[in-house]
Image (cartoon, rainbow, N blue to C red):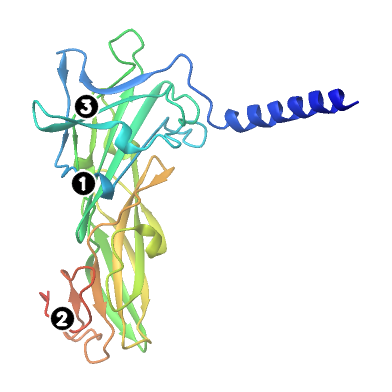
């Protein structure tokens, strides 16, 4: 009887282990994604990257199937590498590595964002699958591009509510590919966020309140009208933006903030409305800053 129980327990535990591992199954055969130009046999690199891995977040997935195929626990420090001979950074990763979810196929996108003080940069690269070449996914050079700061184009006030028209500059330069894709197919939106307080909470989107996503259109800027509650006159309202990629992934980092002071002597449409461009995390209300 005890033997039967033991055998049953082993079977049950085996089924549980199999079920748990299926969520992060190894990709077989494994596929390599790499900064590489197969036509010229030259490596590619990641430009405008400071090397601050502690403030860097990376992700990769099959477009349209991020839930089923993504980086899982295979973190960016494992596949964003430093090449001492050129003092440059490049990408090399293997989807067969433990922790990767699913198995990207057909094409892959790789995204990186890095917080740099009061600003943040991002880049996304796309590659078609080419199984007969040196690497399955040959990534183009990536150039980290500033995540845009919300720009105020118009403002008005009614009581405690300040209405702002905002836009964000084009971010197409953050996209790269060797396969003819266009930025608008992979950069799909600009996410706008707000925060009410006396100091900028930093570049982590988790500290902010999501407002909404405006669709990205190539060659144009995303724009929206948003109401800001200025009933707390002792606090400021901070506005920031992030980037949505393939409609499935939002950059963890947000760009530099635009700040609205809610002092009623400032927050009115008669040129006293105060929009501050450059006040970083930790600077408190009343600290000198550049006024627009």
Nearer-N-terminus badge (2/3) = 3
Could you tell me if the residues under marks 1 and 3 are in contact, i.e. CB atoms within 8 Å?
no
Mark pair 1, 2: CA separation: 28 Å
Q: Is residue 73 visible?
A: yes
Judging by the rendered image, the residue that carries numbered circle 3 is: 140
Mark 1, residue position: 52
* Element at label 3: loop
Q: Label 1's element?
A: loop
Label 1 Cα neighbours within 10 Å, binned few <14 / some 14-19 / many ≥20: few
Q: What residue is shown with label 2?
A: 287
Tell me what residue is drawn at x 33 percent, y 58 percent.
204
Q: Which image quarter is the C terminus in?
A: bottom left
Quarter of the rendering containing residue 75? top left
Q: Position of residue 279 (x, y in %)?
A: 18, 71
SS at mark 2 in the image: loop
Whole-percent x, y for residue 194 in the image: 35, 68
Q: Nearer the viewer, residue 43 or 1?
A: 1
271 or 234: which is nearer to us? 234
Earlier along the polypeptide chain: callout 1 or callout 2? 1
Residue 110 drawn above or below residue 148: above
Q: CA distance from mark 2 to mark 3?
A: 43 Å
Query: Does 194 sit left or right of 51 as displayed?
Result: right
Q: Is residue 208 visible?
A: no
What's the mark number on residue 163? none
User: Hey, which residue is sitting farthest front in the picture?
Assistant: 2
């Amino acid at each position: 009887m005890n033997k039967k129980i033991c055998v049953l327990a082993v079977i049950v535990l085996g089924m549980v282990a199999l079920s748990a591992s299926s969520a992060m199954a190894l990709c077989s055969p494994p596929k390599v994604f790499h900064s590489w130009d197969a036509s010229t046999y030259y490596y590619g690199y990641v430009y405008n990257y400071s090397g601050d891995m502690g403030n860097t977040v990376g992700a990769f997935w099959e477009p349209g199937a991020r839930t089923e195929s993504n980086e899982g626990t295979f973190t960016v420090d494992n596949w964003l590498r430093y090449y001492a001979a050129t003092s440059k950074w490049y990408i090399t990763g293997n989807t067969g590595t433990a922790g990767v979810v699913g198995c990207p196929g057909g094409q892959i996108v790789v995204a990186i964002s890095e917080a740099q003080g009061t600003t943040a940069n991002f880049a996304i690269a796309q590659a078609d699958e080419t199984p007969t070449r040196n690497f399955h996914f040959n990534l183009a050079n990536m150039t980290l591009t500033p995540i845009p700061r919300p720009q105020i184009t118009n403002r008005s006030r009614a009581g405690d509510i300040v209405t702002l028209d905002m836009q964000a500059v084009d971010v197409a330069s953050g996209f790269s590919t060797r396969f003819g894709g266009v930025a608008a197919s992979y950069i799909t939106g600009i996410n706008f966020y707000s925060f009410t307080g006396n100091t900028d909470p930093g570049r982590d989107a988790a500290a902010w309140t999501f407002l909404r996503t405006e669709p990205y259109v190539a060659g144009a800027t995303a724009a929206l009208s948003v109401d800001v509650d200025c009933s707390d006159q002792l606090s400021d309202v901070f506005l920031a933006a992030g980037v949505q990629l393939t409609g499935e992934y939002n950059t963890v980092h947000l760009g530099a903030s635009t700040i609205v002071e809610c002092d009623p002597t400032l927050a009115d449409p008669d040129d006293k409305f105060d929009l501050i461009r450059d006040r970083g995390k930790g600077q408190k209300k009343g600290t000198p800053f550049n006024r627009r």
